[in-house]
Image: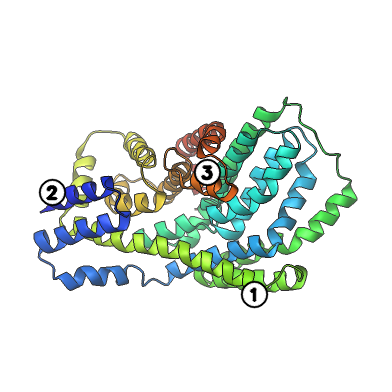
Amino acid sequence: MIALGLVACAILMIAGAPIWAAMLVSGAIISIGEIGLPERSVVSLLYISMDSWLLLAVPYFLFAGNLMTSLGLAGRLFSFVESLLGHLRGGLPATGVVACTIFGALSGSSTATVVAVGTMLLPHMISAGYRKDDALGIIAVSGTLGQMIPPSIYMILFASMVQMDVTKLFLAGIVPGLVITVFLVVTAVWLNFAGGQQLPPRKSLREMSSHFLVALPALAMPVIVLGGIYAGLFTPTEAAAVAVAYVLVMSAIFERKSFSLRKVFGAAESAVVTTSVIFVILGGATAFSNALTYADIPQAFTRYMTSLEVNAHVTMGLILLIFLILGTALDPVPILYITIPIVFPMVEALGYSPTHFAVLTVACMMIAQVTPPVGMSLFALSGVFNVPIGLVMRGSMPYLYALTAALVALWVFPWFSTIFE
């Protein structure tokens, strides 16, 4: 029955069935046929998996990021970063990377970051003479930074699966997020340093100060939200609600002309859709992973891997390679829910730092978002800006290599992830 369940899952995926449905059917076959659980227990798992206080942070952070984009605060942020870097050679591409880094600290959503920064960066780069594919590549890859820079949706999902303190994971993602930013900025400047693009005049100190003051309501948000979490003023879930309230208040005060209930409801609708996709995958994956656990598959896998006389770093390298291979065929969320219940016990048994493993896992999921042929960020960018997917893929390849190099650096130097432990 275990073999039948796994075969059914593979057939359904190949046939194009939704990931959650394939995992749910497989989990049901194993749970009912092999373990003998009643049918209602499988259905109950769908609800129990979503009944988590921590997971409430997901829709709130998504909502906050969408509000930043639709109500106008994101534009203030981009203008400030451009005033600092736009006049330099390769400055506009670097502006895009830095803007994505900061916006990632506001929303935790790759899609919201791609739309917000891309809407402003793409016209600027094209009018200044930069290649369109390069501009698209920067936006696609840099948009994934929101998954490492706290508050990260993937960190929340990881913490909920392994029962870790998400605040600790948020703190662990700060330095790795900055390391990845440096890799991408260096790549962007190197590719565009001698391109002969038209450079805007250098902004005066007074103009920079003016842009800073205009952007201050947006820049203050991560300080308030993350500072409140680390100071113990509120939990990550409460912080997500605070983020929504903060964006609404600041937008109503500073963006009165663009503020409308229609935009607020549109941002809420988008957050609900994305949350629903994540949660329905969570339900199917929970049924699948619970069935595997009852069938002793993760435990057997852990016993086998720990019995091998192989260095723990070699084992971690194999796990990361599996993540990258799966990223060519699956979205990051199902990868997390399929693999983490199996490999996390093994990682703990090998004595590897769970925090370091979480950071490496999220870095692999960032790569999965922009890995052809099914990179989610690639298709999101292609759809939003109505450009051929091949153009986005071609432009993203150099930055995908930089992202992979950053993953290797984070793997080799674990103190990037554990510096705050």
Q: What is the C-alpha distance between the residues marked 2 and 1?
A: 52 Å
- The residue at which mark 3 appears reads as 416
Which residue: 24% across, 50% down? 12
10 Å crowding of disc 3: few (<14), some (14-19), many (20+): many
- Residue 32 drawn above or below residue 192: below
The answer to whether residue 182 is seen in the rendering is: no
Q: Give SS at disc 3.
A: helix
| Labels 1, 3: front one | 1
The answer to whether residue 37 is seen in the rendering is: yes
- Mark 2 and mark 1 residues within 8 Å of each other at the beta carbon: no
Residue 85 sits in which quadrant?
top right
Which residue: 75% across, 61% down? 216
Quick one: label 2 or label 1, which is nearer the N terminus? Answer: 2
Q: Amino acid at mark 1?
A: Leu
- Residue 182 drawn above or below residue 75: above
- Residue 67 drawn above or below residue 380: below
The label shown at residue 362 is none
Q: Amino acid at mark 2?
A: Ala
Colour scheme in use: rainbow
Q: Position of residue 178 (x, y in %)?
A: 60, 45
Quick one: label 3 or label 2, which is nearer the N terminus? Answer: 2
Q: What is the C-alpha distance between the residues marked 3 and 2?
A: 41 Å
Q: Amino acid at mark 3?
A: Phe
Give left or right: position of 162 versus 421. left
- Mark 3 and mark 2 residues within 8 Å of each other at the beta carbon: no
10 Å crowding of disc 2: few (<14), some (14-19), many (20+): few
Quick one: label 1 or label 3, which is nearer the N terminus? Answer: 1
Q: Nearer the viewer, residue 400 or 71?
A: 71
Q: What is the C-alpha distance between the residues marked 1 and 3?
A: 43 Å
- The residue at which mark 2 appears reads as 3
Quarter of the image with the N terminus is bottom left
